[in-house]
Amino acid sequence: MAKIELPVVEGDAGLGRRQWLQGMLGGVGAGLVAIPGLAETHPVHAHLANPAGVAGADARTEAPDWKPEFLDAYQFETLSSLSERILPGALKLRADRFIDQLLAVDTHENQGRFLSALGGLDGEARNRFGKPWKSIAEPQQVELLTAASTMAPGGTAGRNLRDHFDEIKGWVVGSYYSTEAGMRELGWTGNQFYPSFPGCEHPDGHR
């Protein structure tokens, strides 16, 4: 598979989101569209195309006294649990914190869609199992997400469970793969980038 050369950032063993995004956007343009599970129309694209905004959000996630800026405590705990179940390793990369920071500066429309999706998945957990998402067992979480990811989108009938799943998943994968660790998982070597990504090796396949 052909590779595209990217600028090498000297003296930094661990690149932040801003550095690799600047390199990738300069080298491959619309390459973000190829991130697994990230629809081209998802609102996280607009954030990832703005390295300066990404850098600010990324820096804020590392504050010692960090707390959610957009989500309340319950919503954030739900997002954290969903993030790790959708893409194992997401919490280690602070994907949940990063999502909260992006949402805090997003439009009211995008914020509303996110909250509707989060509430939709949480409500489905209550309907199926009588408990909120963060309180159901792992097999039940897998069952719910499998059902959500395999049904057809709502289309003209309105947003359904599949649409809610796709909304949350897009934020999670965009946040995860906008890190050095996420990109290395997909084949980025530090100064080379694959124009099409190798297959993901996570057991869940990141549907």
Image: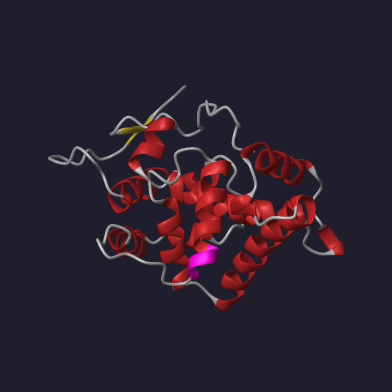
Residue that protrudes farthest toward the top in the picture? 1
x, y (%) of residue 110? 58, 70
Q: Is residue 39 above or below residue 35?
A: below
Q: Is residue 59 above or below residue 104?
A: above
Check residue 54 for magenta coloring: no
Residue 7 horizontal side relative to residue 128, left or right: left
Image quarter for residue 193? Answer: top left
Question: Which residue occupies 28% across, 33% down?
Answer: 191
Question: Which residue occupies 30% across, 60% down?
Answer: 55
- Which residues make up the magenta segment? 71-75
Question: Which residue occupies 41% across, 67% down?
Answer: 68
Visible in this render: residue 40?
no
Visible in this render: residue 161?
yes
Total number of numbered labels? Answer: 0
Residue 187 horizontal side relative to residue 75, left or right: left
User: 61 or 42, which is in the foreground?
Assistant: 61
Q: Is residue 47 above or below residue 108?
A: above
Question: Which residue occupies 57% across, 78% down?
Answer: 108
x, y (%) of residue 136? 65, 47
Image quarter for residue 50? Answer: bottom left
User: 97 or 171, which is in the foreground?
Assistant: 97
